[in-house]
Amino acid sequence: MTASFNIWDNVDDKSQPFPAKGNFPPRLLGAPSSIAEVIEQLESIIEWAAAKQSRLGYFASLYLRVTNTIRSRIGTGYFEDDKRMGALDAVFAGRYLIEADRIICGAGGISQGWGVVFAAANRSDLVIVQHLLLGINIHIMVDLGVACAEICPGDSINSLHGDFLKVNAILAGVVPTALSEMGSLSPCIKLLDDLSEEGEKALIDFGIDEARDSAWDFALKLARAPGSSMQGLIDERNVAATKVCNDIISPGIIVQGILDIVRDVEEKNVELVIRTLDSANPVRIENVGEGSLTTSHDKGTPPNETYYYVIRPGTWRGSFYFKITSWKRLWSSNMSFKNKLFGTLISFIQNLMGGVFITSDMIQHREEGYVSNDVRIFKGWITILHIVEICKLSSNGSGVKVCADVSPGPIPILFKEHDVYRASVYDGGMKSLSHVRLMGARFLGSFSVHADRGGVDMELINDWSHSTGSLQKFLAG
């Protein structure tokens, strides 16, 4: 029996877009039988969502673009079997459209995964990209495999693999391409891309890569499963997909800190967001899979050059305060024992000696393409932490790659480490955000320049500590 989810048990903001119970439009259009019907029903949902100021329209608008991209390739030789692709698209989209109809009409019986997505549409604390990724995660993790198994049951599923990969490529490309075009709605969205680390997927993915990678395995399992066990497999898959959705909604303190900044400057008018996403234009096939949130900077001095070449060069002095906010989280973290010990030692020195001091000597090496920054945190003659940074500016005008050699003062040989992390400069060079690695742990570092450019306030946070500091310019660079 299909696992169901009651959307009304999970609405945490009753003023938001769903209509009152008992006052639903007469929809329940049924499953589409063609791509043309898919487009017609998506357009209907988008219009309803725009009229109701419902964030359900975000994913529907994005999905219309996915569908138009697929349709634009049918008949061009891109897919191996156009007729089969048309049927697959209708079944694939139909699973979402039926669920959306149920929530609009209050019909009940919504699956667990889509229930979480629809409930999240009531939340104004989520950013636009979270609403989009919630829908695309469930649709890929659950619906894509089900649709593939329905169109090509048994061993015939093997013949679908080539076209499956092409659909996957389209799904992989449409989201970042659409987001790169909505900078006016979410001016800080590229922070997510800038702060992704080398060798890791961008923060924007939120597990979507894993969903795509495992969707084919799920399709194979379903296609070859006895009919009596298929629904059980789908229900299990919904549980796993729902867990990913929960990670998207609550991604942890580091990513959440970045999302808070993104949200604060995002467009709040729901209809305007829907209309902007609803370009309905296909993504050019040569760009599929190559979309990027990184956009070129405006004319004038790029923010990263303003911060690193104009404002920050010179000698800065100030105060620094480190506090452990959760000893339990510190000692249960995956940090090494020596790093946990060092964190404890810093806290002990801080509590024993009171406030400590910080200096920053930043030198620009513009011809070589980098800036060096020598940072010392100390109390009297005791150096607590010595960090030497080499900051390489990205050509996108905002990103920075930081290579840091860290030498904790009390026992430098024992604790010395080399770290590489990312930073992003925004607000015209007046603010910087860093995805810092120190002592084997991740921190979110934020730096805000005073209006007169003579001071910088800083903050470092993670799930077990909170550090603050303030620097004043002592000598100009």
Image (cartoon, rainbow, N blue to C red):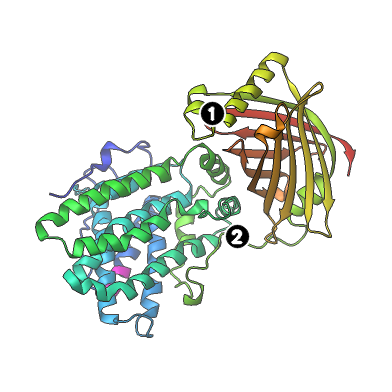
Q: Earlier in the sequence, mark 2 or mark 1?
A: 2
**Image quadrant in which you'd find residue 313:** top right
Residue drawn where x is 74% and y is 57% of the image? 302
Left or right of residue 250: residue 189: right
Residue drawn where x is 69% and y is 48% of the image? 403
Is residue 324 visible in this depiction of the protein?
yes
Residue drawn where x is 54% and y is 39% of the image? 254
Q: CA distance from mark 2 to mark 1?
A: 31 Å
Say if mark 2 contacts mark 1, CB within 8 Å.
no
Residue type indicated by callout 1:
Trp
| Residue 126: % across, % down | 46, 44
Residue marked by disc 2 = 294
**Residue projecting furthest to the front:** 413
| Residue 410: % across, % down | 72, 26
Q: Which one is in front, 449 or 19?
A: 449
| Residue 60: % across, % down | 37, 59
Q: Is residue 37 magenta?
A: yes
Left or right of residue 383: residue 1: left
The overriding secondary structure of the stretch rendered in magenta is helix
**Image quadrant in which you'd find residue 19:** top left
- Image vertical order of residue 227 relative to residue 341, above or below: below
| Residue 477: % across, % down | 88, 44
Is residue 30 visible in this depiction of the protein?
no
Label 2 Cα neighbours within 10 Å, binned few <14 / some 14-19 / many ≥20: many
Q: Report how many numbered discs are placed on residues in the image.
A: 2
What is the span of residues highlighted in magenta in the rendered image? Answer: 35-39
Q: Which one is in front, 192 or 363?
A: 363
- As helix, strand or loop, the secondary structure at mark 1 comes to loop
Residue marked by disc 1 = 464
